[in-house]
Amino acid sequence: MLYQFLYPLHADFTFFNLFRYITFRTIYASLTAFLICLILGPFVIRKLSLMQIGQFIQSDGPESHLGKQGTPTMGGVLILFSVFASILLWGNFNNHYVLIALLSLFLFGFIGFVDDYLMQIKKENKGFTAKAKFLVQILFAIIVSYLIYKCPDFNSKLTIPFFNNYSPDLGIWYIPFASLVIVGTSNAVNLTDGLDGLAIGPFIVASVAYMFFAYVTGHSEFAQYLQFRHIGASGEITVICGTLAGAGLGFLWFNAHPAQVFMGDSGSIPLGGILGTIAVITKQEILLVIVGGLFVIEALSVIIQVGYFKMTNGKRIFRMAPLHHHFELKGWHESKVTVRFWIISITLALISLSTLKIR
Ligand code: 57M
C-alpha cells in the first residue's frame, strides 16, 4: 500500500522514485516483517501461554522432548501476521502473482489454523483427520495452480535444472503437477518441524534462494543474460521472498533452542504451501527438490521408514523417522542436529544457485 500511495508522488519528490525498485522494497519488507515479529513476539507468546495453547508432547518420541511439554505453539500466526502486514506496506497489489501467493498463504494458513484450533483451543484429541487435511490441501492447491495456469504471461513448460534446452510442455497437466509440488512441499515442511529451529532455518534459506530466482526471472536483461525464461510480473515475488525470510528470522529469534514457541501447523503448513507456490510461479518447480532438499530428505525418510515397516511387519531402517529423530536417538544433541541440517540446506541452496550459470 505504501508503494501504491507513495510512488505516484515521485513526480513532485524524486525521493519516492525509490519505491519503484523491487530491491528497495524487498529490503524494507524483510526488515519490517523481522521487526514486527521481534516486537510482537513476547506479546504473542504471553497470550498463547495465557490461553494455555501449549504443546502436548507424545511419550513415544525421543525422551529429551518430554521437557518441552507446555511450550506455547501456534506461533505461525505471528509469522503470517508479520508477512501480511509487511506486504500490505511494501507489496504491489496490482500484480497477479503477488495476489496468488498471498491467497496460497491464506488458504494453507487456514488449514493449519483450523487443525491447531481443534487440538489446542477446543482440546480435541486430534485436529483434522489426516485424510481430511490432505483432501483440503489438494483442493486448495488445485485452486492456486489453476489461477497460476490462467495468468496471461504463464506457460506450462517445465524448467529442467542444468538442461536449459529441454523444457517439456505439460499443457493442462501442469495443474495436477503444480498441485503436487504445493501439497508435497506443505507436508514436507510440516514433517521437518520437529526440533527447535529445524524447519524455519532451511525455510529462510529457501526463501533467500528463491528471492534471487524471482528477481532474475522478472528482470528482462538478467533473464536474457542468464538464459532464463523472462516472466516480468514474477519479479514482484522477490518482495514476498524477502518478507518470508525476514519474518522467518524474527520467528527464529524465539524458536531458537530452547524454543519459547513452536510454529504449529499454523506455520508449517502455509510456509510449505507458499514455498511450493513460489517455485511454480518462478518456473523453478523441479529445482525445489534441491533448494528445499532438506525437506525432501526428511519426507523421504518417512516414506522409506513407513514403507519398510509395513513390508517387513515392523522392522525399521532408521531408529525413528523423520530423520532428525534418528540422529537424536543416536545421541546427537538437538542443536547439533539442527545446525548440521542448516548447513546441509545452505549447501543445497548454493548448488541450486549454480544453475543460474550451469545450464
Ligand atoms: C508433525 N510434529 C512434531 C509443533 C510443530 C507419518 C508420521 C511420520 C507423521 C509424523 C507427524 O505426525 N508429523 C507431523 C510433527 C511436534 O511438533 C509440533 O507440530 C508442529 C508442526 N506440525 O510446530 O507444534 C513435536 O516436535 C517437537 N518440536 C520441537 N521444536 C519445534 O520448534 O522440539 C517441534 C517444533 C513437538 C516437539 O517435541 O511436540 C512431532 O514430532 O510430533 N509423526 C512423527 O513425526 C512421529 N514419528 C513416527 O511415529 N515414526 C515412526 C514411523 C514408522 C512413522 C517410526 O519411525 O517408528 C514422531 N513424533 C512423535 N513421536 N511425537 C516420533 C514419535
Image (tube, rainbow, N blue to C red):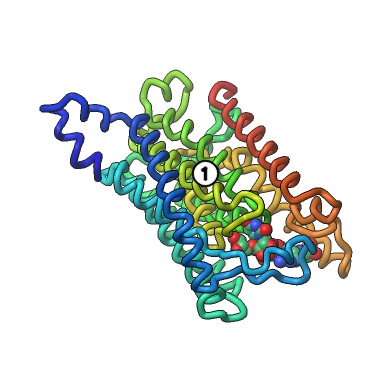
User: Could you tell me which residue is drawn at 47 percent across and 66 percent down?
Assistant: 47
Give the class, few, some or many, for how many residues have Cα within 10 Å of label 1's Cα (few <14, many ≥20): many
| Quarter assignment of residue 241 | top left
- Placement of 113 over or under 24, stated as above or below: below
Q: Position of residue 259 (x, y in %)?
A: 62, 55
Q: Quadrant of the N terminus?
A: top left
- Residue at 54% across, 25% down: 356
Which residue is found at the position 78% from the left and 49% from the top? Answer: 333
Residue nearest the observer in this picture, 153 or 342: 342
Q: Position of residue 178 (x, y in %)?
A: 50, 50
Dividing the image into four equal quarters, which quarter contains ligand 1? bottom right
Q: Residue at x 50, y 71 (%)?
A: 50
Quarter occupied by residue 166: top right
Pick the residue in front: 2 or 293.
2
* Residue to which mark 1 is pinned: 249
Q: Is residue 250 visible?
A: yes
Residue 242 position (above or below residue 353) = below
- Measured along the vertical axis of the image, is residue 265 above or below residue 12? below
Report if the beta carbon of the residue with label 1 is closer than 8 angstroms to ligand 1: no
| Residue 16 on image: x %, y % | 21, 30
Q: Which one is in front, 163 or 104?
A: 104
